Image (tube, helix red, strand yellow):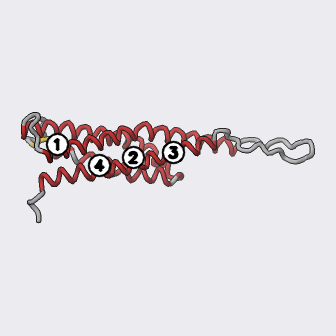
Amino acid sequence: MTTVLDLPLHPLAVHAPIILVALLVLLGAGYLFVPPLRQRVGWAAAILVVLAPASVYGSIFSGEQFADFTYGAGKWPDAVQQHHDNAYWLLWTLVALVPVWFLFAGLDRGRRAALLRGGDAPKPAPSEDGETASTGSDDPAAAGRKVIMFILGAVALALLGLAAWWLFKTGHTGADMVWGGVVQ
């Protein structure tokens, strides 16, 4: 079992996913709902999308070592197994978020680049009768990008909500094992 200063690593390591996943949910929701905020918090959100599942995996790994040391391999009580299962649901929810997040962010970057190009685009030439010809959007992919971004944003928001739920469930089952019946 891994220890830090003669303490098991798991009770110490669980604080990282609590902070990182909660920050990811809050920052991620802001990123999805407030487009002007995206350019400012995009890198922080991208880093959290990668760090949060890594911290959850570290907590699961240290928790398995702690449970095997405490109860023996394969002899975990039901509460420990439920805590472990909730943590795995959290991990896989966050892993599913990674490609969705980076696809959404890539499309948003393309949207912003197209808007910048559109501002510098020359005006359409007038037609023979003197009226300006309407060419529509300067960005032919704009409509499709909006639809795909809406779908990816909805999926990302659902995954962020699920991550918040699994974080709560995992933390609650762990806290109940430690503090249940002690504080009344």
Q: CA distance from mark 4 to mark 1?
A: 15 Å
Depth order, front residue of 82/101 = 82
Q: Is residue 116 left or right of residue 60?
A: right
Crowding near pointer 4: few (<14 within 10 Å), some, many (20+)? many
Outermost residue toward the front? Answer: 78
Which quadrant of the figure has residue 85?
top left
Give the residue number, with chain letter if any, for mark 3.
151
At label 4, which amino acid type do we have?
Trp
At label 2, which amino acid type do we have?
Leu
Q: Are marks 4 and 1 in contact (CB under 8 Å)?
A: no
Helix, strand or loop status at disc 1:
helix
Residue 160 rendering spot, x and y as whole percentages:
38, 48
Which residue does the image show at 46% across and 45% down from the upper left? 42
Crowding near pointer 2: few (<14 within 10 Å), some, many (20+)? many
Q: CA distance from mark 4 to mark 2?
A: 10 Å
Depth order, front residue of 80/20 = 80
Give the residue number, with chain letter if any, for mark 1.
81
Q: Are marks 2 and 3 in contact (CB under 8 Å)?
A: no
Residue 159 bears which disc, if any? 2
Q: CA distance from mark 2 to mark 3?
A: 12 Å
Which residue does the image show at 34% across and 48% down from the upper left? 163
Which residue does the image show at 58% across and 39% down from the upper left? 110
Give the residue number, with chain letter if any, for mark 4.
166
Dot 4 or dot 2: first in sequence order is 2
Depth order, front residue of 169/42 = 169
